[in-house]
Image (cartoon, coloured by chain):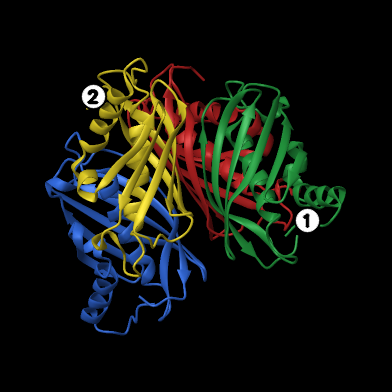
Chain colours: A red, B green, C blue, D yellow
Amino acid sequence: MLDEEKPASDLRSQIEKVLFMAPFIADLGVTLVEAGPGWLETELAVVPRLRQQHGYVHAGVVTTLADHTAGAAASTEVRPGQSVLTADFTVHLLRAASGELLRCRGDVVKVGKRLIVTQADVWDGETHCARYLGTMAVVDQAL
Amino acid sequence: MLDEEKPASDLRSQIEKVLFMAPFIADLGVTLVEAGPGWLETELAVVPRLRQQHGYVHAGVVTTLADHTAGAAASTEVRPGQSVLTADFTVHLLRAASGELLRCRGDVVKVGKRLIVTQADVWDGETHCARYLGTMAVVDQAL
Amino acid sequence: MLDEEKPASDLRSQIEKVLFMAPFIADLGVTLVEAGPGWLETELAVVPRLRQQHGYVHAGVVTTLADHTAGAAASTEVRPGQSVLTADFTVHLLRAASGELLRCRGDVVKVGKRLIVTQADVWDGETHCARYLGTMAVVDQAL
Amino acid sequence: MLDEEKPASDLRSQIEKVLFMAPFIADLGVTLVEAGPGWLETELAVVPRLRQQHGYVHAGVVTTLADHTAGAAASTEVRPGQSVLTADFTVHLLRAASGELLRCRGDVVKVGKRLIVTQADVWDGETHCARYLGTMAVVDQAL
């Protein structure tokens, strides 16, 4: 659980740690925009290797951005020494993303002791590209 | 639709074209194992940059492998000049994947004129890591 | 598509027609609270036969309420002579519903020519019981 | 967990208890066909009140049959004093069901201490109508 009494800069560095410890996320180039208890905003600059055959951002990239942003939002709600693993999720790819910069917002929908339900949305400029709904399992494993 | 009268080598090269035209899939390092009408088997050698913070393969990588393999299986069922785009999917991450090589099998569950439902499973050795269920939209757009 | 120029009473009766033509929905006892273009609010009084073994409202009832409310919201966005059929959906049962009255709000997330993505939420008093995310196929079939 | 040493008739009566303690399932008219550890087959005779506006079986009915059959399959894998609650699921409605009798097969995909992943399929005669994939939470609550 985020310590809400901490100065905002500490809170941000704690979330950045959660966000970027995963090599795959650092490799894609995800960046943190803003965060608070139970939510997160991220961005991803779309380089050519992240696209699919029609030039759109690959569904796997959009999904990874949504899943990791949602997971980081969930991780602000667990106790020290705990972290989260995605149990399952659904993503609806509303519109193809063809732009250069994706934004993502992840939100906690429901916090339980063992399961946290999360939502995430991905935009390409003003275009709402994806809605994600996921279940995270709380695990007794530090980050 | 795959031309089932074609020699097997042509069929394979047609599927490889579908599979690897996506820069993101080539970048991850997915390879084709075997394929036929309505199904596909792929592999992915897991390099360090594809992992998350606990050393497991990132859920986004497992999901991308499942989605693309399922999509390629679906693309064997459409007419020339058509291709498929993922509309939505669900993935259940059954067990964490910690190994060096993932295998994936994608299958078509139902072929419709406008929607194709697909399933995919991902294994890490003998460990069943993920089950994927997806809806692909058939689009009038050549690969 | 709802005729937004029609008097509100016509709009309501059109939606009620959509909502209650399904015998199963009438049988459960769903009622319309309010509606507009792209959204709908419904209620369901929970009689004993709608519960499961622990006394909670059965997941199938919560889901049916969400699916039908979402579908009716989607049906406000199609052209005359068209209707919608659910292609697939996901529902997260956030908390068990044990009360006497469920409320549901259905919203259209994205309208396409062939697919409409919808969301629905179910409450038991102040308790948020379920979030639903669904894909509806637009079909050339009048109600 | 089912006692596999029990005579088959005990096993069947134990599953029937799980299946029919839910008033909503008894009300719909679901019946048990056959069962074993980790799987279940059920049937549902479709009376007129279970249909939707085009005469098809309502998606909510198909889904309830799948969810409850999957849940009963999962309940064969928990310890005495435990039961399962659906956390979330996805259902793909492959083809409209218009017949008089639905059959359903539920299978456990993965058993964990806290989560059980299940699959279910629904047929109308030879027509494969639905595929369901669900996550059940194991709860310390007797049936």
Locate residue D75: give its quadrant: top left
Residue at horizontal 37 percent and vertical 32 percent from the top: D35
Q: Nearer the viewer, residue B141 or A69?
A: B141
Q: Chain of mark 2?
A: D
Quadrant in which the C terminus of chain D appears: top left
* Percent position of residue A9, x then y: 48, 30
Classify residue D99 as left or right of residue D31.
right
Q: Is residue C54 above or below residue C136?
A: above
Comparing labels 2 and 1, the label whose residue is closer to the camera: 1
Q: SS class of the residue under badge 2?
A: loop
Classify residue C85 as left or right of residue B129.
left
Say few, some or many: other residues with alpha carbon within 10 Å of mark 2 (under 14 / 14 to 19 / 20 or more). few
Residue at horizontal 40 percent and vertical 27 percent from the top: D115
Please, what is the three-letter code of the amino acid marked with disc 2?
Gln
Quadrant in which the N terminus of chain D appears: top left
The residue that label 1 is drawn on is B4
Q: Is residue A126 visible?
A: yes
Locate residue B28: give its quadrant: top right
* Percent position of residue D74, x then y: 37, 30
Residue at horizontal 46 percent and vertical 71 percent from the top: C139
Classify residue C34 as left or right of residue D74.
left
C-alpha gap between disc 2 and disc 1: 54 Å
The residue that label 2 is drawn on is D141
Q: SS class of the residue under badge 1?
A: loop
Q: Is residue C94 above or below residue B102?
A: below
Q: Nearer the viewer, residue A37 or B32?
A: B32
Q: Chain of mark 1?
A: B
* Percent position of residue B119, x then y: 57, 44
